[in-house]
Image (cartoon, grey):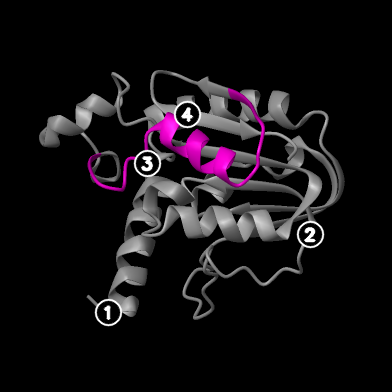
Amino acid sequence: MTDNHNNQAEVSLAEQVAQWYASPVGQLIAEDIRTEYRRQVEDAFGYHAVILGLAGRSLQLTSQARIGYHVVADEPEGGALRLRPSALPFRTESLDLVTLAHVLDVDEAPVAVLREVDRCLRPEGKLVIIGFNPISFFSLARLFPRHCNRALRVGHRNLPWRIVEWLQVLGYEVDEVSHLAGSPAVCHAGTW
């Protein structure tokens, strides 16, 4: 499988996740995520925040933190420019807040993404991870393909405790793992 084919598959799945948030159930869960996200980032302060992932725009998270400048890095409609989460165009230790909105659900190399985010995040910065919990009741719906959006049936399905282990290896102190609506998990990694 070529790298370009992998990128197309990731975009396709990421777009499906973003579209799922436009559904009635997705909108309810998005509201729960915004409420929890607001709580998680209420003490975040700084100049630069980045939200990675197509779902970031669907979730409307930019106004939730007291950060001067927000960038939502996703695929522009019809655009040719692609941002790779494992090779971010930001200086080392230049970001105060990074949010991964389903990036680890769709990226082929989630550990490489976390390493790259670690490179870009300031030592006292915050990392918030939003993803589907593969062992929740809601995610079990993916076993019934006729009743479940494809976005919930495919993906890499990283277990929350596996992501916590990866973060700890990178030296992060995980403040909290929150489970919402029986579906997505919002992982909040604090300072390192």
Give the residue number, with chain letter if any, for mark 3: 20
Q: Earlier in the sequence, mark 1 or mark 3?
A: 1
Q: Earlier in the sequence, mark 4 or mark 1?
A: 1
Instruction: Kindly indicate the quadrant of the structure image that contains residue 175.
Output: top right
Secondary structure category for the residue under label 3? helix
Q: Earlier in the sequence, mark 3 or mark 2?
A: 3
Instruction: Kindly indicate the quadrant of the structure image that contains residue 188.
Output: top right
Q: Earlier in the sequence, mark 3 or mark 4?
A: 3
Q: Is residue 122 above or below residue 178?
A: below
Secondary structure category for the residue under label 1? loop
Give the CA distance from mark 3 to mark 2.
33 Å
Q: Which residues are magenta?
A: 153-176
Q: Tell me the kind of residue under disc 2.
A: Glu
Q: Position of residue 93 (x, y in %)?
A: 79, 59
Q: Looking at the image, do the residues carrying marks 3 and 2 touch, with CB atoms under 8 Å apart?
A: no
Secondary structure category for the residue under label 2? loop
Q: Tell me the kind of residue under disc 1.
A: Thr
Q: Looking at the image, do the residues carrying marks 4 and 2 touch, with CB atoms under 8 Å apart?
A: no
Q: Position of residue 104 (x, y in %)?
A: 44, 48
Q: Is residue 47 above or below residue 168?
A: below
Give the residue number, with chain letter if any, for mark 2: 93
